[in-house]
Amino acid sequence: MNTIQVLFFFLSVLAIFSAVMVLVSKNPVHSVLWLITVFFAISGHYILLNAQFLAIVNLIVYAGAIMVLFLFVIMLMNLNADSEPRKNLWMKLAGVISGGCFLMVLISLVRQTIELTGKTALMKEGNIGLIKNLGKALFTDFVIPFEISSVLFLSAMVGAVVIGKKD
Amino acid sequence: MTLLAFDWAFLLEKLILIAIIVLASLGIALYTTFAERKVAGALQDRPGPNRAGPFGLFQPFADGLKLIMKEEIIPSTSNKGLFILGPGLAMTAALMTCAVIPWSSYIEIGGRKIELQVADINIGVLYVFGVVSLGVYGIMIGGWASNNKFSLMAALRGASQAISYELAMGLSLIAVLMISGSLSLKTIVEGQMADGGLWNIVYQPLGFIIFFICALAECNRTPFDLPEAENELNMGYHQEYSSMKLGFYLFSEYVNMIMSSAIMACLFFGGYDIPFLDESKLPVNTAAILGVVSILAKIVFFLFLFMWIRWTIPRFRYDQLMNMGWRNLIPLALFNMLLTGAVILWQQG
């Protein structure tokens, strides 16, 4: 086991444990905080894959902005452990089955699109995740999807303003 | 057994550097509280603290001792774990920023080159942003866990203020990044030190003003100290806190001030560069020590500016704060970005 493997297993265990804690926590605020830990662990994985830019953007956008908004809503609505609606057993079972089906679809999709046998993840090498290469790829090869998604964001922003505006 | 095979001397060197930087930041923060009261005294035409020691120099230690010795009160209706986590998180986030700040070039001890920067990562500036956005959690968690309506309102204010001003801050930063072409703080500083290179403030006066205003807001300093508006909120998000937990919140504000001063010095004022002096002609170690003195002098200047503003300008109203952030600073920062981009394109032909 070298350093990278130690870190990999540590981060993986942390990510899975925190993800389970997100679901198990009774208090919504605790769930959000555990979710932030998950994002940290995933950012750690990005760093292991030498994608520092993705790692830090993941933190800024998800942990820094989106989760703060989550906390806002939860704190303002004053959701507490006792006000959380109790779901019955059948609902939980249905959730598990549908989630499992989705996971199966995802795995089969990944297996079919890329030939994975005999390949290992590039640890600490590969440079597509660095900001320079990522920028070049986004603005040359993938410029049309990139611009289309920016229009999508713009329309979402306009929509939010229209809904939020009092008239 | 090669479980963890790497350069142990390197690790030791970095650990010593981290210890020095963290202790120095805390020490400076300690005396910043003292300086703040002295500056306030001077601006209000009174002596300020002058009882403990010569010129009142031991006052910060007396304050610290008082905070530590005070009785610790954890409200019975609070969320205990998060109540303790809050101030710890605020302090951690404040101190984490110092990892990417280049304090000087490098020193040589026994042929070993020691960089005076903990980590020169190629996303330095973004790292700072990531850490700053985490600092919000310290305030939010503390305010919520106190189980007090005033604390909660103050925490929400603080968080929304921080998110709003982060946008304008990031946009004003993009113009600087366009000029220097790198996200690493060290490369940005070296670009300003190079022959014929001017400090970024010359190219980006508007960007600096926007960045400075946002830094005031991010540090919750007057005129943007809405989360601590005691005449509206009793005291602020740390109302239920006592003893050293309160001390951590108050202290992290000062550490934040030091770190944002250091970042402003690096981005706009040449970092450890000494104006009108060619450092490469000096012996390496002398140049490095002079560099540290130089960046510290710039930090002290910005700290004074922070205090000067605090004791001069009254607090904004909350809607004024939001209007200024979203309607004035963000369009201005976008305009600055556009202008910089246009000029760079024009120069390239």
Image: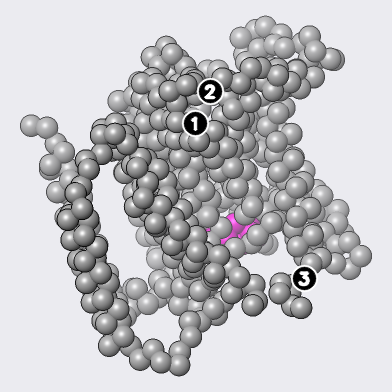
Q: Chain of mark 1?
A: B
- In the rendered image, residue A137, in percent from the top left (x then y), is placed at 37, 77
Same chain check for tags 3 and 2? yes
Task: Report whether B341 appears left or right of A82.
Answer: right
Earlier along the polypeptide chain: callout 3 or callout 2?
Answer: 3
As rendered, which of B52 and B302 lies closer to the eye? B52
Residue interval drawn in magenta: B182-190
Identify the residue under disc 2.
Answer: B74
- Within 10 Å of the Cα at label 3, are there few (<14), some (14-19), or many (20+) other Cα atoms? few
Mark 2 and mark 3 in contact (Cβ < 8 Å)? no
- SS for tag 3? loop
Identify the residue under disc 3.
Answer: B7
- SS for tag 2? loop
Marker disc for residue B80: 1
- In the rendered image, residue B45, in percent from the top left (x then y), is placed at 65, 7
- Within 10 Å of the Cα at label 1, are there few (<14), some (14-19), or many (20+) other Cα atoms? few
Residue drawn at (21%, 60%), measured in percent from left and top?
A93
Q: CA distance from mark 1 to mark 2?
A: 7 Å
Amino acid type of disc 3?
Answer: Asp
The reply to whether residue B43 is visible in this rendering is: yes
Res. B325 image quadrant: top left
As rendered, which of B120 and B181 lies closer to the eye? B120
Earlier along the polypeptide chain: callout 1 or callout 2?
Answer: 2
Q: CA distance from mark 3 to mark 2?
A: 45 Å
- SS for tag 1? helix
- In the rendered image, residue B122, in percent from the top left (x then y), is placed at 56, 65
